[in-house]
Amino acid sequence: MSGRNSIASIKPRDVAATLLWLGVVLWWLNLQLGQVAAAEQRDVDRREPKRVLLLHSFGRDFLPWSEYARSIKANLEQRSPWPLDIQEHTLLTARFIAPGPEGPFVEYLRSIYEGHPPDIVMSIGGPAAGFVQRHRAELFPKAPMVLTTVEERLIDRASLTERDAVVSVRHDFVAAFRNVLQVLPDTRTIALVIGASKLERFWLEEVKKDIGPLEERVSFVWYGDLPFDEILKKASVLPPHTALFWGLMSVDAAGVVHDGESALHRLRAVANAPIFCFEESFFGRDIVGGPMHSIPELGQKTADAALRILGGEKPADVKIEPIAYAVPKYDWRELQRWGISESNLPQGSEVLFREPRIWEKYRWQLALIAAVILVQAGLISGLLHERRGRRLAEVESRQRLAELAHVNRYSAVGELTASIAHELNQPLGSILTNAETAELMLKGSSPDLQEIREILADIRRDDQRASEVIRRLRSVLKKAPFEIRDIELKETVREVIGFVGDVASGRNTVLSFHAPPDLELNVKGDPIQLQQVVLNLILNALDAISEVQRGKREVSVIMGRSANHAEIRVGDTGPGIAVADLKTIFDPFFTTKPEGMGMGLAIVRTIVEAHHGTISAENQPFGGALFTVRLPLAG
């Protein structure tokens, strides 16, 4: 009874709610299972390689299409989220003047891919595009296709299906020829090199249709009906102001198949005119350049289309505009070869393959050399500055030396006053006596003219003697800059001996001078300063002897030669020099005289060293001091 009441108490509304909740749970579980299954399927799809069929028109290594195919494959392999199985085949019939039937090749492909169709078919070039369009139903009725690297005029738009996508290019022959005329304004003829296959004959006719606007400006020559060897002969003897334009050479008029790269290289080797082309595949090898189709751009756009289709997008929805010429590019080496000025190139052009300038090629070496040169220049500048400062200091030192020496000479002349007066009084007194005698004789009735002539000669001789004393005094007292000139040292010293001879006699001292009569002592120096050296040494010797009360009083000046030096030795019979003073006797302000300043010998050493000489002092074995001056001989 209670069980029945419990069941009866369940309301229909509660049952409905429970069922609804169970339905939601089942829907959510189903959704999750579907997502897991889809994820597993995607993982399977990503693990499964995508089979890509590349169908070439002329061959895997035939320029220019081989470069486009290489760029497409590289883009696919780098960007594909799936493993790729790229399989390549070539439609060789496009390389023949009279291509054979296509049936056997169709059967070959069908036997390979029967039951295992490719995930995508990609045709490279115009002949391959035409082939897959003609045999699509037989070969790949359901496989998506991308027709690429094909000029848009070679696409049969009416035959395209929803499973087809196109990546085409656009040839603008007028723009290519206008570029030739801009780069070479004097061009009168353009010779077009092209083969004789069906495709090449098609393009020759297309060029002839397009060049109407240029025929008044330039004439055209067509090489489509000649064997390639004949084309080479004509290209070697082209008239001036001619340019060659490389179109396509797969097979020539003689039926000989040519590889595009080797054929162009042979043409450049003999051509006497520059070669232009709109295919980037040949750029950097043998052509000048110009506006060209960009290989990277076409490779990228073709890979974009293929990956979108492999990802599930409908091929018919993949719309890509025909690819036009890229920014003009030129080979710097060819511009130099043909003397083409860069000012003739279109605005915004690129010039590649420039030979690096010496700075770019040897940047680090030149930078190092420049651094070394700068360092050396800095060092040289510093040395020159130091040399200039040293020379200025030397000049200033010499000026001060001259001033100090001049003061020293005044001091020495003060000591020679008595001698100077005696030297002047003697000739002046003699002149006066002779003049008075001559006057008395002239007052006589019959003067002796011969004796008067002798008196006048004595007056003239005494006058010259007085003049010589004054000249010597003036030369000693003259304030003149340090002057280097050639002098005869014996005569220079002899003048000093004559000047101080009376001073020595006044001090009861014998002054002797010894010099070999045949000895020539020529030196470079300032005669006044060298006389001051000898004068100072003689006066110092006289002062030293004045302290001697007994014994011989003598000062000797001896001249001689030692190797390449002239020597002046001034010795005396005085008390000599204390041994302790021998090392400091030439120092400034050193003196043994109570009234002395201690500058005489310091000035002597300075003057001698300024003449690149040396001076030394020593005691003689028999007593007295000896000063030896050595001066380099001239020459």
Image: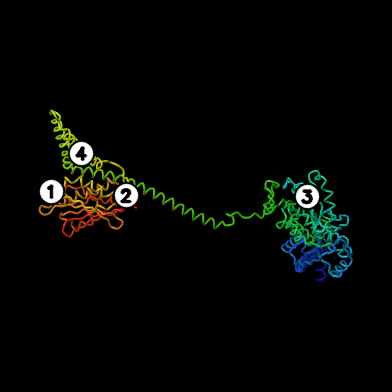
Q: Callout 3, which amino acid? A: Ile
Q: Nearer the viewer, mark 2 or mark 4?
A: 4
Cβ–Cβ under 8 Å for marks 1 and 2: no
The residue that label 3 is drawn on is: 190
The residue that label 1 is drawn on is: 508
Q: Position of residue 186 (x, y in %)?
A: 73, 45
* Of callouts 2 and 4, the N-terminal one: 4
Q: Which secondary structure lies at badge 1?
A: loop
Question: Whole-Å distance between the Cαs marked 2 and 3?
Answer: 85 Å
Question: Whole-Å distance between the Cαs marked 1 and 2?
Answer: 35 Å
The residue that label 2 is drawn on is: 524
The residue that label 4 is drawn on is: 461
Q: Callout 4, which amino acid? A: Arg
Q: Which secondary structure lies at badge 2?
A: strand
Q: Which secondary structure lies at badge 4?
A: helix
634 and 457: which one is in front?
457
Q: For residue 369, which numbered disc appears in the image?
A: none
Q: Say whether residue 335 is visible.
A: yes
Q: Say whether residue 29 is visible.
A: no
Of the 4 image quadrants, the one containing the N terminus is: bottom right
